[in-house]
Amino acid sequence: MRLSQMLWVTLREDPAEAELTSHKLLLRAGYIRRVGSGLYVYLPLMWRVLQKISAIVREEMNDTGAQECLLTQLQPAELWQESGRWDTYTKAEGIMFALTDRANREVGLGPTHEEIITAIARDTIRSYRQLPQHLYQIQTKFRDEIRPRFGLMRGREFIMKDGYSFHENEESLKETYYEMDRAYRKMFDRCGLKFRAVEADSGAIGGSGSQEFMVLAEAGEDDILFTEDSSYAANVEKAVSLPPEAVPSHFDKFEKVHTPKKGTIETVCKLLKCDPTQVVKQVLYQVIYDNGTTVLVLVSIRGDRDVNEVKLQNELTKLASNYGGKAVINLQVADPESQQKWAHSKLPVGFISPSLDDSYIDKSSTVSPKFLRLADRTVEHLQNFVTGADEADYHVVGANWGKDFTLPTVVNLDKAKAGDRAVHDPSQILQTARGIEVGHIFQLGTKYSQAMKATFTNEQGEELPLVMGCYGLGVSRLAQAAVEQSYDKDGIIWNKAIAPYHVIVTVPNVGDAKQMDVGERLYTALDAAGVEVLLDDRDERAGVKFKDADLVGIPYRVVTGKAIADGKVEIVNRATKVATLVEIESVVEYLQNELK
Amino acid sequence: MRLSQMLWVTLREDPAEAELTSHKLLLRAGYIRRVGSGLYVYLPLMWRVLQKISAIVREEMNDTGAQECLLTQLQPAELWQESGRWDTYTKAEGIMFALTDRANREVGLGPTHEEIITAIARDTIRSYRQLPQHLYQIQTKFRDEIRPRFGLMRGREFIMKDGYSFHENEESLKETYYEMDRAYRKMFDRCGLKFRAVEADSGAIGGSGSQEFMVLAEAGEDDILFTEDSSYAANVEKAVSLPPEAVPSHFDKFEKVHTPKKGTIETVCKLLKCDPTQVVKQVLYQVIYDNGTTVLVLVSIRGDRDVNEVKLQNELTKLASNYGGKAVINLQVADPESQQKWAHSKLPVGFISPSLDDSYIDKSSTVSPKFLRLADRTVEHLQNFVTGADEADYHVVGANWGKDFTLPTVVNLDKAKAGDRAVHDPSQILQTARGIEVGHIFQLGTKYSQAMKATFTNEQGEELPLVMGCYGLGVSRLAQAAVEQSYDKDGIIWNKAIAPYHVIVTVPNVGDAKQMDVGERLYTALDAAGVEVLLDDRDERAGVKFKDADLVGIPYRVVTGKAIADGKVEIVNRATKVATLVEIESVVEYLQNELK
């Protein structure tokens, strides 16, 4: 393609809308354009990148025997009502765009496709002899994000590969699941990405086991914990660890002590000369279930640890039926504003004990909240600990479970962090990194097939629900993550596997007939040899062209400059910036070798 | 692919939901599945067909220098408000799905992309030196159809290629427009379709010239008129013609005659022994503009002709500003039900004259309609004609314009039909055919660029609106149209260019080790030779397999039956049903030759 004929405009300035470097670079280098909140047009260069990633994904998926199809983007509400997710997705979390058609039927715009594919499976799969099956698609998905940002990272439209497999049993599911693990690793390797596969929380998709694939990048939104030897790696939301041992307490007597204005762990430890591991702190959450019930959850956790809210939400989801609900739709620390809705008087925040009674709660309020106490496993074995006295400016010391306080139900709620020991091998210390989630594979089990009655008949003639897996990969997100992982001060550095073009032939001065002639000849020869090549034949200054070439990040630049007098051109490697003089007649061969 | 591993289920019975043969066949042969009104999942076989069509479209588009991109499916309302189409598309015609996002912004789901691409052009094109440009995409589009039907023909989701070009002047636009005409013909030829390019109405898209590409099929929704020598072809909506000359009237005196119950042209002509070409008939339309104004339009037209409502709507759109509106949102013959809303007393329908006065209209009704008279050019030169007397059971004969009736404004409103003479060469008689519209190319001009202020600077330094063209092609519709054009009583007959696979190797009895062995060997050899091949290794009766192979329409079937004893297999051509015995060792070569 000739740049003089391509719709391609680069920007000098960083666009105000962008925070992430990759977002800025994709905008500046003319890959994408914003047309609305979280809505980006993929311009011709970007589309080539996306097509290359898609081709790699297709090849690896087809290689496993998965079959490509295309499901509808509009999804009838009835299917989501069958699975029980309509309200959660359109009202509670509200991440699914929904609309009413001219016949007054409700329709959603697919953020994911478990319902549609389960309906198809229910219609077409009858017997174990048809199993396993694995269908996938590459398609634009929609999410009504609360805060669309970071360009293609968190847009309201994005391209995904999503696959769904159907099995007669867990064993067959696991085979495909592990096959997908291998296929995903191959795809990311082929795209030239540094990544980690990590244990993950299954979230709203559900199921028993799941794994995320994280492209490593400083600016990633996700925290990853891993051991040096890679024997363990997990998203911080899911990670488990052995916290450090608690320092033995030097208090030996239960008493109330005056701790004026020492409402934080740090200040109270300083005053009482104790270690945070000797303190039981309380965090009060306000939780709302999908049936409208509000529950106040008092979590007791060791002073040096934080609550992992994903784990807390999972625990509370298990308890949902106790409160007549099915799902948690809101979970937040009970802030002063929310307290006003149901508290009689001001809570002694910072001085609350594990036994805070519910007399603070106005049960006649319109909210009329329930009350629940939970303890993290880090406090279970503490002795002579320090904790709040349920009175502002007072703590108690030397406290013990059973004697001074009732131990609430113990669960695992603490957030693992760097420096903790690994559970499977306490000699290994967890380290941390940041990543961008680009893939997520799930063992769904029978969650959807049971709800939607998608069954098959096994060899023994029994009718059983299909066992399902699902496998997502963010194609457009991967493209931007690749940029986030590979750029320098001058612009993008594409890996040759997913670069929009392999080579850019830059003619420094299009007014110079010799330069132009060599440029044209090389452009034609490279194109004929199957090298994807751009010709910068624009009537621009050489400096502008070099800057643009660096910005757009094509792996090799061929410059038809002064060296043509000696029958040579300069070939610059975008990543290393190393320039090599190459005989004009050898350029095609040289670049074919480099691109192998 | 092995059929034993593919998600593929054929149906014995015709599905109740389908009317068109192609729709029935695609459902029965396991290509598509319905998941909601007008919503179809493309199963793996269908997806392969669509990918092949897309590949042909891409190759031909890229060949012209057009650049592929991907625009957003969600479209901010503001852009459509700029072009003035938001209300027409979401309210009046209501064919665009619209929704409100969580931030209370209105968004539409793209049925077409003039607004988005014009916004991009406005942002990126500054100078004539960047022109011409042509961007295209292949994408799922959405339409909230009043009556979704015919499977992929009129679905609520469908795949289209849509391209948009930008030019400095009409001349450059025409170059690309004619280049697209050639490219489209090549695409349809390559897909193996019988088609016609016809002049078309530009409808809601707008612009000066447009042409449709019709796949010829008995069941097509569109009527085409054309001359034997193909020098003229047009959609009936757009077609012009020379109607037959009127037979001279034998009435020479204006008088009122009693014509009891003869309210139709046929009955009154029989009674009065006259020819329909001597009669001026009146058709009363009720028209509603986008500002709510109702206009009653009395059309006078020759007794043997019908009103072309598309032409009428275009005329009334030109007159919109007279009534304070911009667009016609409803146009229908004033039926008794609508008459009740604004008529004082019963209109003498069947006996109305060109001068029907508006005393029938209740101007104090809530509708308060305006009144307009139009005459088709077929009545302009009639003399001594027959027409209604504005009184039930009475006509007048021997009437003349100027003397007995005032001639209303004359326009061209009559529907051309088979048997009419061609305008450009009256010696040619128009013939008729039915077609399925699969492509439509438009010279848009500056309609969108002016409204949205997308300008460029020409060589003389003047700022001018970009001149635009747009080029649509229905990819999923084309796939079904291909089936509608090519099937027999046993099933689909795919052209090899777009068939999901080239060859199906049918093993009649998988329990027969020799049959299976030959099947496996041929499957592997064909696959290795680049032939796209299915292996029917299902444990089914031979009869079922043969029926399924015919139904699914793969161009060649290889049967590893009894002939293998002689070292041969039977190769059956799906289209001709001709069976040939071929040496096993020559099968690959034989099929490669056939598929060339």
Image: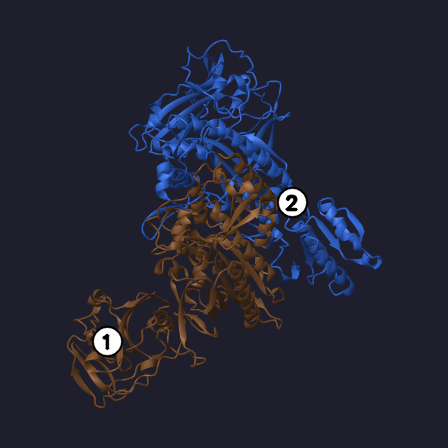
Chain colours: A brown, B blue
Q: Is residue B126 left or right of residue B50?
A: left
- Residue type at mark 1 is Glu
> In x, y percent, where is residue A412?
37, 77
Residue A535 visible (yes or no)? no
- Residue type at mark 2 is Ala
> In x, y percent, where is residue B304?
53, 22
- What's the mark number on residue A266? 1
Q: How many marks?
A: 2
Read off the chain for label 1.
A
> In x, y percent, where is residue B1?
65, 58
State the SS at label 1.
helix
Read off the chain for label 2.
B
Q: Residue furthest right?
A: B566
Of residues A42 and B140, the one nearer the viewer is A42
In space, the residues marked 2 and 1 are separated at their CA atoms by 74 Å
Mark 1, Cα crowd under 10 Å, few <14 / some 14-19 / many 20+, is some
Residue B472 visible (yes or no)? yes
State the SS at label 2.
loop
Q: Is residue A308 above or below residue A476?
A: below
Q: Decide: marks 2, 1 in contact (CB < 8 A)?
A: no
> In x, y percent, where is residue B446?
42, 31
Query: Label 2, on which residue?
Result: B497
